[in-house]
Image: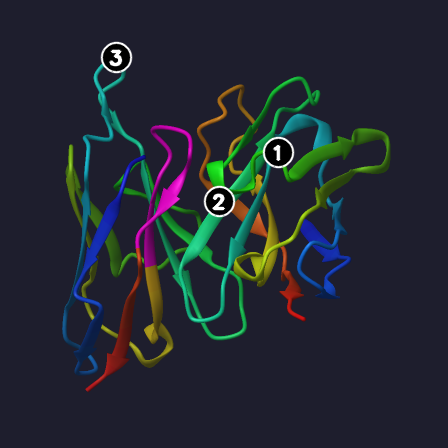
Amino acid sequence: EVQLVESGGGLVQPGGSLRLSCVASGFSLSSYWMNWVRQAPGKGPEWVANIKQDGSEKNYVDSVKGRFTISRDNSKNSLSLQMNSLRVEDTAVYYCARDHTGGSSQYNWFDPWGQGTLVTVSS
Amino acid sequence: DFVLTQSPDFLAVSLGERATINCKSSQSVLYSSNNKNYLAWYQQKPGQPPKLLIYWASTRESGVPDRFSGSGSGTDFTLTISILQAEDVAVYYCQQYYDIPLTFGGGTKVEIK
């Protein structure tokens, strides 16, 4: 069964840091672009970042550039998101999501998704 | 950035009736070199991640019931649920993958009338 499991969420103060992880099973992570997508309470999803199969290309939404870093370890079938200088507006459920087709394009739609991990930024 | 505007925000439909959800993009998501529309649709139920329904604007994902269909081209798209069933109560989102940043619409909540 293809599965993505996120971990690492929690409560953090503004300005703090958090590292999210996503472990994949049922497929080889090295064959796919991988994404982080977040969803604030009561809002629609927002794509955050993606990373190419070999880690050589990364893209970010403007609101997290310079603060968040996406990375991957294909040997461990895992994806990470290092989040620094966190803001209240970063509060959301963070989902790990796979590129659907495993192609070379960075322009992805997402399937499957993990169940998400909640990040709360509050003093 | 590509802005996707969904309408309506909320839709109440009787069981067995048709539900129609619209998604309008601020720019065309039709790529001329392959004549494909870079648009997907998702369904999200409470406490669950979004589930892929449709990609390339009209290609149904494997296992998705055929009462779900997508149509449209360029900047205007529609998701249709032909015969609404109780399990279709959810929020529906469109997403463009024509350009970075990848963006989603604001969602349409579908309930039973």
Label 1 lies in what chain?
A: A
Q: Is residue A73 left or right of residue A115?
A: right
Same chain for marks 1 and 2?
Answer: yes
The percent coordinates of residue B104 (x first, y second) are 36, 48
Q: Secondary structure at mark 1?
A: loop
Q: Secondary structure at mark 2?
A: strand
Q: Amino acid at mark 1?
A: Gly
Q: Nearer the viewer, residue A48 or B68?
A: A48
Q: Is residue A68 left or right of residue A65?
A: right
| Quarter of the image where one finds residue A74 | top right
Pointer 2 residue: A47
Pointer 3 residue: B33
Residue at screen point 52% across, 59% down:
A89
For disc 3, the neighbor class at 10 Å (few under 14, some 14 to 19, many from 20) is few
For the C terminus of chain B, the quadrant is: bottom left
Q: Amino acid at mark 3?
A: Ser
